[in-house]
Image: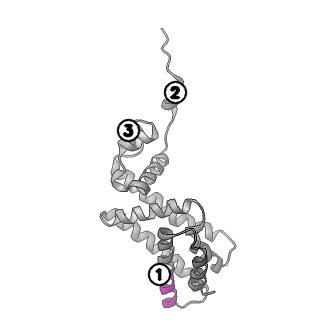
């Protein structure tokens, strides 16, 4: 006797998630609901798979949380710096691109929500705090390097980098549709143009 399975069941069973799928779903959950909502069972339910799929990729929830921090660091810092460095743009234009990140696309609001969620998580978790510290240092170092290329001395470059970084983070959190004029004024002041 041949036992037939439904097409939906075969499709569901045939669907193999990658670790990146779990990480992306977990980051989405983190951005919307915070780190406490990142749970294996709820992620599996959201992804329409069993928990076994999770444990194929991760030893436990802590491993997922660590992978999430690594993914955020790569996507929200390293990939942006690498993309800017591959361009033929001047240091001023690369700096301008960074300052415009909060307005760059519809994904900017999602990125700002994730940034805030990770920073809130870092207030109570040592691993998240270490990741945020590392990211902050990398981002600030890149800003300092761009400002030095524009001719600012070390102290001036460090101070301007800090203010610029604080602006980028804050603008991502408080950005309003009518803030274009203010953003242009801030950009001119921050770049010194």
* Residues at marks 2 and 1, CA–CA distance in whole angstroms: 53 Å
- Residue 8's tag is 2
- Is the residue marked by circle 1 packed among few (<14), some (14-19), or many (20+) residues within 10 Å? some
Q: Quadrant of residue 152?
A: bottom right
Q: Which residue is mark 3?
A: 51
Residue 69 seen by the camera: yes
Closest to the camera, between mark 3 and mark 2, is 2
User: Secondary structure beneath disc 3?
Assistant: helix
Q: Which residue is mark 1?
A: 162
Q: How is the image coloured?
A: one colour
**Range of magenta residues:** 153-162
Position of 15 relative to 166 (above/below)? above
**Disc 3, disc 2: CB below 8 Å?**
no
Quadrant (top left, top right, bottom left, bottom right) of the C terminus? bottom right
- Is the residue marked by circle 2 packed among few (<14), some (14-19), or many (20+) residues within 10 Å? few
Q: Is residue 155 magenta?
A: yes
User: Secondary structure beneath disc 1?
Assistant: helix
Q: Is residue 189 magenta?
A: no
**Disc 3, disc 1: CB below 8 Å?**
no
Q: Quadrant of residue 137?
A: bottom left
Residue 81 seen by the camera: no
Residue at the (44%, 54%) spot, across then down: 27
Furthest-right residue in this view: 88
Q: Earlier in the sequence, mark 3 or mark 2?
A: 2
User: Secondary structure beneath disc 2?
Assistant: helix
Q: At which x and y percent is residue 38? A: 37, 50
* Residues at marks 3 and 1, CA–CA distance in whole angstroms: 43 Å
* Residues at marks 3 and 2, CA–CA distance in whole angstroms: 19 Å
Chief secondary structure of the magenta portion: helix
Q: At which x and y percent is residue 71? A: 47, 57
């Amino acid at each position: 006797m041949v036992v037939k399975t439904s097409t939906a069941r075969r499709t569901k069973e045939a669907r193999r998630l990658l670790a990146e799928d779990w990480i992306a779903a977990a980051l989405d959950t983190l951005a919307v609901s915070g780190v406490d909502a990142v749970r294996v069972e709820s992620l599996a339910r959201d992804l329409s798979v069993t928990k076994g799929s999770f444990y194929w990729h991760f030893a436990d929830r802590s491993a997922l949380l660590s992978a999430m921090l690594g993914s955020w660091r790569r996507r929200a810092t390293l990939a942006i710096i690498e993309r800017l460095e591959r361009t033929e743009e001047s240091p001023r234009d690369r700096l301008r691109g960074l300052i415009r990140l909060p307005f760059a696309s519809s994904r900017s609001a999602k990125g700002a929500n994730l940034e805030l969620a990770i920073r809130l998580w870092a207030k109570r978790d040592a691993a998240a705090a270490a990741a945020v510290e590392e990211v902050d240092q990398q981002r600030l170092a890149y800003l300092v390097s761009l400002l030095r290329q524009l001719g600012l001395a070390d102290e001036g470059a460090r101070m301007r980098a800090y203010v610029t970084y604080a602006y980028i983070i804050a603008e991502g959190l408080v950005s309003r549709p009518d803030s274009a004029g203010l953003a242009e004024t801030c950009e001119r002041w921050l770049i010194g143009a």
